[in-house]
């Protein structure tokens, strides 16, 4: 097969903090069915009715590590609301992820995309790649690259989805 | 195991490893690698831009992309494509006034050694659609398939009927008639018409493997160049076919493939046979040296994947660049103040590439 030009949707990933969420125009939401570190299966479809932040990341990705605390801050600030975070690790061994989480405890599930198939389905070849999924299960916003997820513009977008 | 048995086993293992390229595959296991490409645009004047090639987008049974990320001070950066071959790259742009433009791109990918047994057609082998067949037979700006190219290929393949026979004849011809010229800048730009017309068949991989591709296409054998980077030492015992340190800034290398019904895409690398001849220690080996003969046998049908494939693109127009088309995208490119920097001079542009294997 001729090389397939898939990355047109991978738009801007600008310098940290300077970028905004981009409205999603990439079509239907791909399925997401993955196990977490404890073997529990998470299905995005089961989160219907909630706003879900799906973050594709890896321990070797510096911007991923840098933005992770801001995702945790956002989650904590929205405690008690129908907001969830699913952090999808791309293709790394369990031990490496666990060592990372010992240094950076997170209050949201880390899912294991062992063969990178979910990342490919979501076109997350560049990390971090983060998607905001609305209560209806449709992707509403996407951001490629590091972002301060606890910043006011992001909170505003999330609040709109939660309304 | 007693000491004597241990010594015997060790001696046998050492002898086996001394034999050049004994088995087609060094390993059937997937290996994970990480490359870090750091680009600094020195002495910027006005708006600066850089284009950094990324690992091949499509997964194959010999290379899979895990992902890429980047850091730096670009005003904007995004993944871009050449739009025709799917050659992907990070495009970064810095505003006028940025004193020290810098970007660092990290990519992770997996590779596995690759070999095609040309004695055994595969029942479910990949098929080429008519459109793809036409695509991989078409001339490019730098690789014509008519005139002296076709005339030469017809002579080379006289008596050959199948695609494998034609490709084999062309491969042997390239090995026998070309040579690696150490004075060629970079990997050579693959102007095969000029090479044939001048009779000067010296060059590097960009020339010699482009010669294979052009000759093959001209006699209706689909073929393509693959542009990439050596990322590790050779496990087959060839110092010249791998890299000896994590610094792979100058380890760019292109390979080639041809398509044969019943087998799919078949890896070849006649340019690396000529590299073994010239560079394998102590250097300037005879063509009948066992190390050359072993490499010649294996490089028609197999690749050691101590290698990262970037893309298979020709005549690449860099997005957002006012510069001319490139014969291919394998190096880091940058421009500042509307002027392209020399992509073959990492020191003037200031880029470096490091590679390491990632163990679990």
Image (cartoon, rainbow, N blue to C red):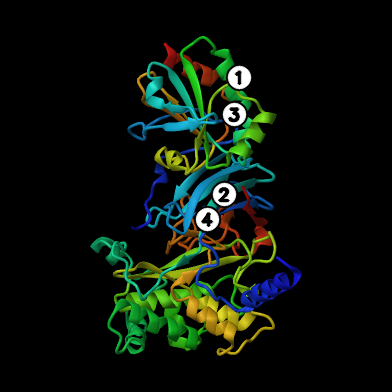
Tag shown at residue A17: 3
| Tag in front: 2 or 3 | 2
Mark 3 surroundings: few (<14), some (14-19) or many (≥20) residues within 10 A: few
Tag shown at residue B107: 2
Pinpoint residue B237: horizontal percent, then vertical percent. Answer: 63, 73
Mark 2 surroundings: few (<14), some (14-19) or many (≥20) residues within 10 A: many
| Chain name for mark 1 | A
| Tag in front: 2 or 4 | 4
Q: Which element carries disc 4, helix, strand or loop?
A: loop
Front residue of this view, candidates B331 and A26: A26
Pinpoint residue B342: horizontal percent, then vertical percent. Answer: 60, 63
Residue underneath mark 4: B30
Alpha carbons under labels 2 and 1: distance apart: 28 Å
Q: Residue at x 57, y 13 (%)?
A: A77
Tag shown at residue B326: none
> Residue B282's image quarter?
bottom right
């Amino acid at each position: 097969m001729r090389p397939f030009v898939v990355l047109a949707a991978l738009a801007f990933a600008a310098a940290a903090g300077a970028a905004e969420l981009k409205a999603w125009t990439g079509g239907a939401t791909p399925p997401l069915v993955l196990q977490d570190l404890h073997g529990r299966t998470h299905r995005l479809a089961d989160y219907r009715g909630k706003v879900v932040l799906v973050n594709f990341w890896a321990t070797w990705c510096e911007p991923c590590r840098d933005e992770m605390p801001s995702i945790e801050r956002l989650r904590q600030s929205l405690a008690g609301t129908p907001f969830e975070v699913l952090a999808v690790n791309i293709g790394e061994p369990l031990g490496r992820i666990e060592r990372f989480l010992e240094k950076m405890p997170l209050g949201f599930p880390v899912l294991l995309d062992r063969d990178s198939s979910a990342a490919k389905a979501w076109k997350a070849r560049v990390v971090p790649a983060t998607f905001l999924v609305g209560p209806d299960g449709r992707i509403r916003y996407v951001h490629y690259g590091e972002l301060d997820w606890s910043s006011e513009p992001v909170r505003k977008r999330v609040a709109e989805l939660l309304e | 195991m007693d000491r004597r048995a241990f010594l015997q086993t060790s001696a046998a293992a050492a002898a086996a490893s001394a034999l050049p390229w004994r088995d087609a595959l060094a390993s059937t296991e997937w290996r994970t690698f990480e490359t870090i490409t750091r680009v600094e645009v020195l002495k910027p004047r006005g708006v600066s831009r850089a284009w950094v090639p990324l690992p091949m987008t499509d997964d194959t049974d010999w290379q899979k992309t895990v992902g890429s990320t980047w850091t730096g001070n670009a005003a904007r950066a995004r993944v871009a494509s050449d739009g025709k071959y799917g050659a992907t790259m990070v495009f970064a742009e810095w505003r006028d006034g940025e004193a020290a433009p810098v970007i660092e791109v990290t990519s992770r990918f997996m590779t596995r050694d690759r070999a095609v047994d040309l004695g055994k057609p595969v029942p479910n082998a990949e098929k080429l659609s008519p459109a793809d067949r036409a695509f991989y037979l078409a001339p490019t700006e730098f690789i014509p398939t008519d005139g002296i190219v076709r005339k030469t290929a017809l002579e080379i393949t006289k008596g050959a009927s199948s695609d494998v026979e034609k490709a084999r004849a062309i491969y042997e011809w390239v090995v026998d008639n070309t040579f690696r010229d150490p004075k060629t800048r970079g990997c050579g730009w693959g102007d095969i018409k000029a090479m044939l017309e001048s009779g000067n068949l010296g060059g590097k991989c960009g020339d010699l493997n482009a010669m294979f591709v052009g000759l093959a296409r001209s006699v209706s054998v689909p073929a393509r160049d693959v542009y990439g980077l050596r990322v590790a030492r050779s496990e087959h015992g060839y110092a010249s076919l791998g890299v000896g340190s994590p610094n792979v800034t100058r380890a760019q290398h292109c390979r080639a493939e041809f398509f044969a019904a019943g087998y799919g895409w078949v890896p070849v690398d006649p340019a690396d046979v000529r590299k073994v001849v010239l560079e394998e220690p102590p250097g300037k080996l005879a063509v009948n040296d066992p190390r050359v003969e072993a490499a010649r046998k294996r490089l028609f049908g197999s690749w050691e994947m101590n290698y990262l494939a970037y893309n298979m693109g020709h005549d690449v127009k860099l997005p957002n660049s006012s510069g001319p088309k490139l014969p291919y995208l394998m190096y880091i490119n940058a421009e500042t103040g509307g002027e392209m920097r020399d992509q073959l001079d990492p020191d003037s542009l200031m880029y470096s590439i490091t590679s390491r294997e990632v163990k679990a």
